[in-house]
Each structure stands twice: as C-alpha cells, then as structure tokens.
Image (cartoon, rainbow, N blue to C red):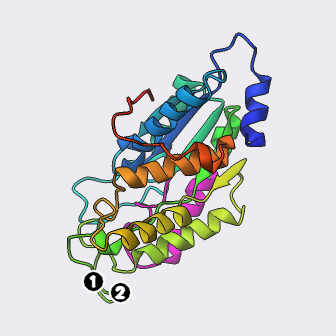
C-alpha cells in the first residue's frame, strides 16, 4: 500500500468507516467510471479496509478559471465550489484531475500555463489547510486519432473543444511534466498521462481502428486503465490483482 494512504488509514480509529477520498475534476471525473471501477475492486479485494470514494467532478470545469470564446458558457472553476466540497465531504484525501480543459484546446501559451500552475498550487494549499492530503493526477492525454471533428494547425485564429489544436496533447504533456517535477505542493502526484498513452498504443496494436472515446473523454477501457493506475500507485495493488478491473457487469459503488 502507498505510504500516504497507509498512514492516513492507520491514523483513523478502528471503529471508523474508513478513509474518505474525494475526487475533484472535469467531465472525465464527472463520468465517474474510473472511480466506480476502483470502488468495485476495493470492495471485492480489500473488504477489511473500508474506503469511501466520493466522485464530485463537474463537466467543463477548470482549475485555472480560463474559458475559450466558443464555449457556450464560461467554464466553471473548481475554486468557486472548493470550500463547500471540502466542508461537505470532510475528506482524508482529495484526488484532483485537471488540465484537459485548462489549456482550452489552444497551442501552448505561457499565460495559460501560468494560470494552470497557479490554480493547482492554490488547490493544493486549500486542501492542506482543510486538513486533507492532496493527490494530483497528471492530465489524461488528448488522442487526435479518435477525434472526429476538425483539428486545427497552430496558425489558426482560434481554438475550442470543438476545434482543438491538432497537437494539443503536447500541451497536456507539458502540464503533466510540470506536475511530475513535484513543483506543486501536493502530497503525491500520479502520472495518468503516460499510462493512458501506453494503453492507447497497445489497443491500436490489437485493433488499428480503436477509438479512445472521443479523443477527450476516455472510453470504458480507458477508464479501466485509469482505475488500475490509481489502485496501483495510491493503494499499492499488484499488477496481477488488477486484471479484471472494469469488467462489464461490475456494479458501480462510488457515491
């Protein structure tokens, strides 16, 4: 088991219902599949270590407060709800996954990157001030090959989730690399970017027509890969234990 989780679990009273893990994020987290898959595995494989997973993702959300002109409404920002979510859930650990919307589907720009860095740092600091541990997920990739809309060159006049920069994944990799340097004051950072790129690569070796959802939002197999990564990195699960994560027919149990 990861030392962060093990320490959190051991500090709780034996008659406690177990640690509470709050998940914050955008539409990928709002979908909740990777959280449900992880919850199913925990209930099946670790019944003696009860853990409550609370999924509180919001579609279109950012940590940076940015929004593109073509978005039908200003994108919500997690900082507008963070205090309420922390007070309501009283979590022991907060897992946050942001980045996909924070580059607002544009080529790399220093101002946008600075807004993302500031937002993640503020998020981590506020979680710590609430007495919880912070786990940040490096953003999942953008898969251009799965995107069915137009992909724009760097010289295009504007970009959005409907018409993204064709190399947008390079922007997300830069955001992921920054998180993985440890520059943000989090307790733990999990790389979701590289494992999902490897998942896409392997799936395409088996099926050249494989689609990673719509390129922005993972399909079910992508969510299963996210759950395996989370369980391995945060909870210390062994690879051999995780083969059936996300199998069809599993009941969802995350809140």
**Residue 243 visible in rendering:** yes
Disc 2 is placed on an element classified as: loop
Identify the residue at image location x=21%, y=70%.
148
Q: Is residue 39 above or below residue 185?
A: above
Residue 36 badge = none
Identify the residue at image location x=37%, y=71%.
204
Identify the residue at image location x=78%, y=41%.
3
Q: Which quadrant would residue 104 be assigned to in this image? A: bottom left
Crowdedness of circle 1 by 10 Å Cα count: few (<14), some, many (20+)? few
Q: Is residue 15 above or below residue 67?
A: above
Q: Are marks 1 and 2 in contact (CB under 8 Å)?
A: no
**Residue 76 picture location, percent across and down:** 37, 48
Disc 1 is placed on an element classified as: loop
**Residue 95 picture location, percent across and down:** 57, 43
Q: On the rendered structure, is 238 left or right of 69?
A: right
Depth check: give the residue in front, 227 or 142.
Answer: 227
Q: Is residue 74 magenta?
A: no
Identify the residue at image location x=36%, y=48%.
27
Q: Which quadrant would residue 129 be assigned to in this image? A: top right
**Residue 90 picture location, percent across and down:** 60, 25
Q: Which residue is mark 2?
A: 154
**Residue 205 picture location, percent across and down:** 40, 73
Q: Which residue is mark 1?
A: 157
| Mark 1 or mark 2, whichever is nearer to me | 2
What span is colored magenta in the figure? 98-121
Query: For the view shown, which residue lies furthest in the top direction?
Result: 15
> How far apart, in angstroms, are the residues tagged by discs 1 and 2?
9 Å
Depth check: give the residue in front, 204 or 185.
Answer: 204
Crowdedness of circle 2 by 10 Å Cα count: few (<14), some, many (20+)? some
Instruction: Assign the C terminus to one quadrant of the image.
Output: top left
Depth check: give the residue in front, 251 or 169.
Answer: 251
């Amino acid at each position: 088991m990861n030392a962060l989780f093990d320490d959190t679990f051991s500090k709780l009273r034996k008659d406690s219902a177990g640690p509470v893990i709050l998940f914050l994020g955008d539409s990928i987290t709002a979908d909740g599949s990777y959280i449900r898959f992880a919850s199913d595995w925990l209930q099946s494989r670790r019944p003696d270590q009860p853990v409550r997973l609370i999924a509180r993702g919001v579609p279109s959300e950012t940590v940076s407060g940015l929004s593109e002109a073509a978005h039908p409404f200003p994108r919500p920002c997690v900082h507008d709800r963070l205090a309420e979510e922390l007070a309501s859930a009283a979590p022991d650990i907060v897992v946050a996954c942001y980045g996909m919307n924070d580059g607002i589907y544009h080529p790399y720009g220093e101002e946008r990157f600075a807004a993302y860095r500031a937002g993640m740092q503020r998020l981590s600091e506020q979680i710590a001030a609430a007495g919880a541990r912070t786990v940040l997920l490096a953003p999942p990739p953008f898969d251009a090959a799965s995107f069915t809309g137009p992909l724009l060159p760097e010289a295009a006049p504007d970009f959005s989730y409907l018409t993204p920069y064709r190399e947008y994944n390079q922007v997300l990799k830069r955001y992921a690399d920054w998180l993985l340097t440890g520059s943000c004051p989090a307790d733990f950072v999990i790389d979701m970017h590289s494992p999902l790129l490897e998942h896409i690569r392997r799936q395409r070796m088996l099926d050249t027509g494989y689609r990673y959802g719509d390129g922005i939002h993972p399909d079910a197999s992508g969510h299963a890969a996210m759950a395996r990564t989370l369980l391995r990195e945060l909870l210390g699960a062994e690879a051999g234990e995780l083969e059936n994560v996300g199998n069809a027919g599993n009941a969802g149990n995350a809140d």
